[in-house]
């Protein structure tokens, strides 16, 4: 059984791309592996050092992941800042991280370009904190996107460096968890690319029916097919891809036939798509609202997660301190 760790952003909302992408695999994975899922509130400060309401953001994200299917009794679901051992390991790893290698990371260089007015030390040492998140649980597998592959490689480097410097075989080298063909890519509503918060083309699981309807009706289309059975351009194929994951097979076949016969009315298709998305999202949205408003339940989940995570993290940190040479007088 693998020890799997994955971070969760503490800003933004879960959207259909998240749900049909990694999250559905997380829900299945939690029953097959020893899984740790954490809300990365420390990480968020590297780009948003003065959040308007960090607590509410974390509360919303926690409610959404619980409503979507993560089970705190099965997996370890916790808030990063509730586990102070992570911060101490981050400090210790920083002593063996070198400024040159950190400055060369792609994510750091990208952030410097995007936020030149906020190039802080936390941004520079982001890969070290990510490494601490991973190796404090001795994770063997980490689901990562393309943009985080280099940071995972850095985590392996820090694990190997610690082992080499102190002549131990303590930290395993975490490997990327590849979902392969299981990972469904959900397109956005802007006609190209995947659905994402930063792209502004997403349908959130907490969106109201009216918001969803307006978003779908604004989705990019064209003037319609001009030849029978012609290949769908990307914006149109995107709508059909969305329909394939939320609508019935008969509905998809109906609109495919209309398209192939050059008789499709995009307005009608969008109305149907919006209705089907709302039907799919409605029970999740209602559960999000119910969980978000249940303060005692959220407290219980956060406490349970912190307890389970700290039990493992404190054991790792105790051994790390002994390896380095910290001893009580």
Image (tube, helix red, strand yellow):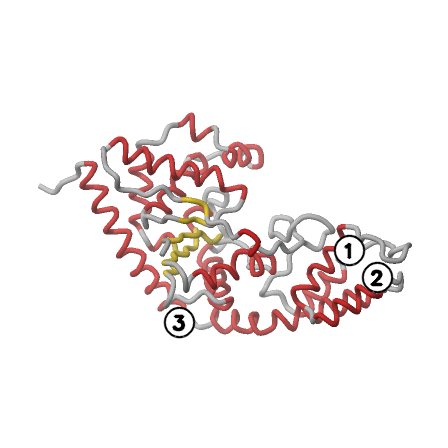
Q: Residue at x 55, y 55 (%)?
A: 12
Q: Which residue is mark 1?
A: 236
Front tag of 3 and 2: 2
Q: Nearer the viewer, residue 70 or 300?
A: 70
Gap in angstroms between the C-alphas marked 1 and 3: 43 Å
Q: Which residue is mark 2?
A: 259
Is the C-beta separation of discs 2 and 1 under 8 Å? yes
* Residue lying at the far top of the rendered structure: 100
Q: Is residue 34 left or right of residue 106?
A: left
Assign a secondary structure to mark 3: helix
Vertical position of residue 176 compared to residue 274: above or below: above
Return the x and y of residue 212 as percentages of the image width and height.
68, 65
* Residue lying at the far left of the rendered structure: 329
Q: Residue at x 76, y 52 (%)?
A: 235
Q: Which residue is mark 3?
A: 297
Label whose residue precedes the other's in the sequence (2 or 1) = 1
Quarter of the figure with the N terminus: bottom left
């Amino acid at each position: 059984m693998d020890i799997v760790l994955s971070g969760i952003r503490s800003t933004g909302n879960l959207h259909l791309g998240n749900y049909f992408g990694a999250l559905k695999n997380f829900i299945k994975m939690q029953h097959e592996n020893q899984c740790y899922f954490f809300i990365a509130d420390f990480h968020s400060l590297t780009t948003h050092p003065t959040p308007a309401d960090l607590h509410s953001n974390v509360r919303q994200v926690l409610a959404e992941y619980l409503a979507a299917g993560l089970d705190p009794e099965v997996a370890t679901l916790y808030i990063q800042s509730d586990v102070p051992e992570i911060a101490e390991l981050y400090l210790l790893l920083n002593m063996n991280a070198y400024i040159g290698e950190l400055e060369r990371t792609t994510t750091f260089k990208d952030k410097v370009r995007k936020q030149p007015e906020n190039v802080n030390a936390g941004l520079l040492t982001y890969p070290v904190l990510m490494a601490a998140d991973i190796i404090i649980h001795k994770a063997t597998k980490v689901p990562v996107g393309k943009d985080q592959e280099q940071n995972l490689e850095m985590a392996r480097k820090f694990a190997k460096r610690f082992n080499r410097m102190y002549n131990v075989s303590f930290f395993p080298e975490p490997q990327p968890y590849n979902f392969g063909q299981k990972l469904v890519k959900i397109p956005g509503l802007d006609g190209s690319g995947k659905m994402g918060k930063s792209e502004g083309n997403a349908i959130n699981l907490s969106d109201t029916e009216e918001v969803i309807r307006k978003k779908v009706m604004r989705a990019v289309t064209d003037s319609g097919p001009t030849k029978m059975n012609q290949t769908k351009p990307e914006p149109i194929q995107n709508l059909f891809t969305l329909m394939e994951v939320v609508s019935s097979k008969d509905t998809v076949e109906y609109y495919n036939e209309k398209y192939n016969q050059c008789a499709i009315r995009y307005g009608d298709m969008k109305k149907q798509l919006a209705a089907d998305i709302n039907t799919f999202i409605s029970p999740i949205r209602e559960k999000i609202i119910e969980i978000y408003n249940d303060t005692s339940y959220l407290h219980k989940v956060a406490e349970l997660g912190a307890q389970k995570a700290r039990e493992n993290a404190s054991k790792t940190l105790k051994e790390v301190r002994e390896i380095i040479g910290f001893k009580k007088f």
